[in-house]
Image (tube, rainbow, N blue to C red):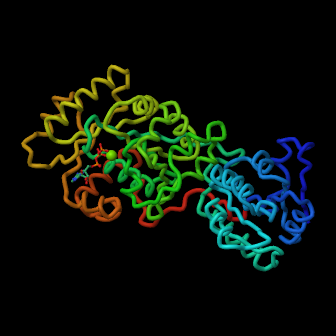
Amino acid sequence: MAISSHNLDALAEGEAMTAPGSGGRSYTLAVVDPDPKLRTRLALQLGEEADVVTYSEVAALAEYQPPGRPMVVIFGPGLADAQGLAEVERFTRARPNAGAILVAAELSTGLLQQALRSGVRDVLGAPTEAVSFHESVERVARTLTMVPTLAPAAGEVPTHGRVITVSSTKGGSGKSVVATNLATSLARRSSGPVVLVDADLQFGDVAVMMRLAAPHTVVDAVAAHDRLDAQFLQSLLVRHEPSGLLILPAPLEPSFAERVSGEDMVRIVEILQTFCAYVIIDTPAQFNDVVLALIEHSDDILMVAGMDIPNIKNTKLGLQTLRMLGVPEERLTLLLNRANAKVQLDVSEVERTLGIKAGSLIPSDIVVPQTVNKGVPVVLDAPRSEVARALEQLAGLFCDAPASSAPIRKGRSLFTRS
Ligand SMILES: Nc1ncnc2c1ncn2[C@@H]1O[C@H](COP(=O)(O)OP(=O)(O)OP(=O)(O)O)[C@@H](O)[C@H]1O
Ligand SMILES: [Mg+2]
């Protein structure tokens, strides 16, 4: 049995990072309580082979365990009051990858409610009964298995993912439809992880289009400041199970957009590139600072244009801006959306006007709004439709591997024992 009861004054930070606490598990097991006897009793109850780190206070746990590291934390009776739970809440909010269990001397409905609001996943009465204690730890640990470990392990060569920004200078031209379907198709083709970032910070609707609840958003990544690293960022991503695509959703409120700068977004993308093969970015309809910073950082820019005169006029202005900014021509791909529409605009005429050949033509199809309303990408819901085939052809420009029919589980699971 190894219990490392940290003498917090003496403990160096580096020591804590490599201190016991994994015991063959892929997550840290920690006990926090101000009473040393209680701490030890709880740690001992976790079993002979369990390797537990113990702390007298939440601040010490936060200080010595790196963010992003998966852990199950048992908060003892000393934290089962309003003040203790406020600390627990601060901890769990900053650590989406930590599963909290509260052990309380007296269980009341009020305490249970407060505990759940503080991000605690299970509450047990003291003294704890060994079997239910173990079951609780296992149950909470299982909830953490949802987060895949994708960051390169020590000694592994980091990926440098290809960044594809989907943009247009006109609202409603089809950027989000293109971005969600392109990313879904790439996720099914690529052997490495694929992530879709919603950089439409005010009105992003990627999560809605993929029918996903967004527990975390770009704002959580920006708020992490210096703590932001690959592991922490991974814990914020939501996984689209049918395709394996990872998503970083837009903020939940338009006003949050003000807190995010172009520099912030580029840093997030740079970290994503270290463990993803492709980073697809959906953008709003204007070239704001965030979009321009992302475009500058991108390997490919997909300019989406609808087949009407105002769309073409704005696309021309957009392309001129990109050329003025020195974006190399070979990074630009023109996508004409609703290209079969009977709108009396000829594709070759449009190409001549814009001074660039279209790399992709996406037909207009009622199945698109239908699948948007279902929250299922058209490449999954109606793969035989013409529009899905055109979107697959577009994905083929970036990855020529065929799409797999089964969802791919990319990356190592945090909880698979090696
Ligand atoms: N090829 C298509 N055929 C039919 N409908 C389409 C097609 N492409 C997009 N649409 C529809 O057009 C609407 C706008 O598409 P989308 O949300 O992708 O545009 P956007 O450029 O992201 O808009 P915004 O600028 O508001 O973010 C959606 O309702 C979508 O269903
Ligand atoms: Mg959009």
- Horizontal side of 227 relative to 324 (left or right) equals right
Rendered view: 3 above or below 277: below
Looking at the image, which residue is at 84% across and 66% down? 50
Image coords of residue 63 (percent x, y): 77, 45
Farthest residue, direction left: 344
Image coords of residue 114 (percent x, y): 65, 63
Looking at the image, which residue is at 44% across and 58% down? 188
Looking at the image, which residue is at 16% across and 30% down? 352
Q: How many marks?
A: 0
Looking at the image, which residue is at 89% across and 68% down? 41
- The residue lying toward the viewer, choosing from 298 and 74, is 74
- The residue lying toward the viewer, choosing from 76 and 242, is 76
- The residue lying toward the viewer, choosing from 296 and 54, is 54
- Horizontal side of 190 relative to 326 (left or right) equals right
Residue 211: image quadrant is bottom left
The quadrant of the picture occupied by the C terminus is bottom right
Image coords of residue 252 (percent x, y): 45, 49
Image coords of residue 27 (percent x, y): 73, 59
- The residue lying toward the viewer, choosing from 10 and 345, is 10
Residue 349: image quadrant is top left
